[in-house]
Amino acid sequence: MLKLLDYSVEFPTTGRSFQNRIEFAPGLTAITGRNEAGKTLVMEMVRYALFGKDALRGLASDYRNLSVTLNLGIMSHDVLIERLPRKETLTIDGEVTAVGAQAINAAVPALLGYGLDVFDIAQAAVQGDLGALTEMKPTPRRQMVEKLVGIDVLEQIEKDCRAETKTQETLAASLVTSMPVPQEPVAPDDYEPSEKLQQISDEVQAHQAERAQLLRIQEPVAPVAPISPAETDVGMLEAHEANRQVLLQAQARLQGQLAGIPIARHSREELAKALAYQEYEAEVRRRGAKPEYSAEQLQAFQAKWDAIAACDGRESVTCPKCAHSFLPDVSDDVADLAAGAEPPIGTGQITTQFRRIELWAGPLAEVSPFTIDNIQQEILAHARADDRAAIATELAGLEIPADRSGDLRAARAFQQEFAVYRERADRFGREMGLFQAAQARLASLGDRSGELDTLQRRLGEARAYEAALGRYADAKSAYDQLCERAGAARDLADGFTRGGTALRNARTKVKQELAPSLSRAASTLIAAMTNGERRFVDVDHDFNIIVDGQPLQTLSGSGKSVVNLALRIGLGQVLTSKVLPIFMGDEIDKDMDQERATSTHGTMQNLREYLTQIILVTHKEIEADNVIRL
C-alpha cells in the first residue's frame, strides 16, 4: 500500500514547476483538479519512484531538479525509496539495502517479483493507455499475458531441459566409447615386491661397499727420525742472535751518526785565511767599481753643465754702440764658463761617480787570495771534530759476536721435523691398528658381487610390473569413473526428460486454467460495472475476447473501456494482488457516461478484498473514500 509521496520537479521547456506532498489512505482515492494541474504527474512520480527513468513520460533531460520520496508497504515490509538529485537510496525495514539508480532499479523488481511492464498492465492504466491490452492482435496479446504469467519462461526452461537431455545422452555415449577396457598385467615368474628386492639389493651393496672400503686401507709405512744438528738449544741460540742483533743495531746507529759528521780537510789557520778572503771579496762586491774622477773634477764638470743649461736656447744680443755680443739675463762669468767643449761625462754619470767616491772613502786592506771548496762543510767539520772522535771511539769499542743464525735455523728445522716425526709415529700406530682390524674384517666378509646382477634384473622386472599394475589401477579407476559419469549423465538425461515433461504439463495446465480464471474474474467485474448490461467476458486459449457473444472490436468506446478495465484488474488479481494490492487509473472513465462511471467506481470500491488502494485520476464527480484536489 502507498503511504506517502513527496516530489518536486521543474520543466525548463515550459518554465513550470510542481511540488507536492501526498499522504495516501486505504480505499478509493480520487485525484481531481483543473487541466494541467499535475494530476497525471502524481501517477508518473509513483512509477518513477518504483522503476526509475524508464517510467518517465519524456526524456530525462526534460526534467530538472527531479526529487521523489515514496514510502509504501510491500507485503510485510516497510519500504522507503528516495530518488534525489545527488543520492538515490532504497531502505527496507529501516536498513539501507541499495544505493544508486542502477542498484535500486534492480532491487525493486526483485522485491516485487515483476517489473514495469507487468505493473503497467496489471496495476496501472496510464493516461490514454487503457485499451493497450485489447488493441493488440490475439497472438501478441496471448504472448504478452503468457510473459506476464511466466509461461514463456516455462517454455524456455522446457526447451533447455530437452537440450540438456540431448547433451547428457551424447556425453554418456561419448564417455563409454572414449576409453577401452583396461587389461591387467601379468606378474614375472620369480616376482617378489620391489620394496623387498630393493632391501636385499641395498644389503648386498652395503656388504660390497664395506669390502671396497676395507680393501682401500693400505699397510702404513713407518716414519724415519730426523738427524740431530750439533747444537739443538734453540733458546740459547735465539738469545745469542738477539744480543748480536742489538749490537748490530747499535753499530749501525753509530755508523749513521759518524756518516753525518764531515771530516776536516784543512787546518784551522787555512780556514781562517779562507774566511778572511771571503769577507774581503764580499766587501769589494758591495763597493763595486772604483771612481774615475776626483771630487773637484766632478764639481767642475757639474758647474760646466749648469752654465750650459743656463745658456741653452737663448739668442745673443749685439750692443749698437760697441758692437759687443752678450746673452740677456746671464752674467759674463756664466757665459764664459759655458763656452768651450762639453765635460767628458753627463750629469747622471757625475752622480754615480760621487756615489763611488762615498763607497770607497774608507780604507780597505788587501788580503792574499785563499779559497776552500764547500767552506760551510769545513766549518761544520771543525765544529763537530770532538763529537766525531767520541763516536769513533765508541764504535771501535763495540765487539760483534759471531753469526750463528745458520745454527739457529738448523735447530728450529730439527724441532719442526721432530714434531712431525712424533705425530707421524703416533699416526703410524693408529693406522697400523686400523689396517690389522681391516684385514681381520675382510677375512670374515665374502665377495657377493655375483648376486648384484641377478638382483638388479629382478628389481627392474618387478618395478616394471608394479608400474604397469599402477597404470592399470589408474586406468581401471578412470574407467570406473567414466562409467559412473556415463551412468550419472544417463540419470541426468532421464531427469531432464521428466522435468521437461512436467514443465510441458504445467504450462498446459496454466494455459488451461488462465483463460477460464481470467474470464470468470472479468465477467464478474464487467457485470458490476455495467449494471448487468454486459455479463460475460470469454477469453479463449488463443486469447480471442468475446463479450456476450460479440467480438470485442465491435463494441463501443465505453464498452471497450470497461472490458479493458475488467481484464486488467482481473490480471492484477491473478498476478500481483498479494504483493502490492493497488490499482492506479488515469482518466479511465473519460469514455463513460455518468451512470456507467458511477457503476465502475462503485465496483472498484467493492474490490477491497483484493485491492487495498485504488487511485483514480478523474474529472468526474465520484464517490470516493478520499479526495485529493490539485
Image: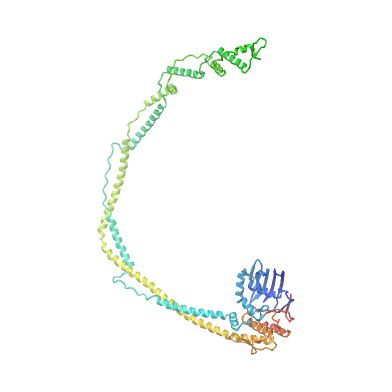
Residue positioned 27% across, 40% down in the render = 227
Q: Position of residue 461 (x, y in %)?
A: 31, 68
Horizontal arrangement in the rendering, residue 626 relative to residue 574 (left or right) = right
Residue lying at the far bottom in this picture: please name it. 549
Horizontal arrangement in the rendering, residue 36 relative to residue 487 (left or right) = right
Residue positioned 35% across, 34% down in the render = 241
Q: Is residue 456 above or below residue 138?
A: above
Q: Is residue 448 visible?
A: no
Tag count: 0
Horizontal arrangement in the rendering, residue 202 relative to residue 18 (left or right) = left
Q: Position of residue 5 (x, y in %)?
A: 69, 73
Image quarter hosting the C terminus: bottom right
Image quarter hosting the N terminus: bottom right
Q: Is residue 490 visible?
A: yes
Could you say which is closer to the camera, residue 226 or residue 197?
197
Residue positioned 28% across, 52% down in the render = 433
Query: How is this picture coloured?
Result: rainbow
Q: Position of residue 126 (x, y in %)?
A: 67, 78
Q: Position of residue 598 (x, y in %)?
A: 72, 84
Please tell me in which quadrant of the rendered image residue 463 appears: bottom left
Could you say which is closer to the camera, residue 288 or residue 573?
288
Q: Is residue 337 above or below residue 30?
A: above
Please tell me in which quadrant of the rendered image residue 420 appears: top left
Please tell me in which quadrant of the rendered image residue 137 appears: bottom right
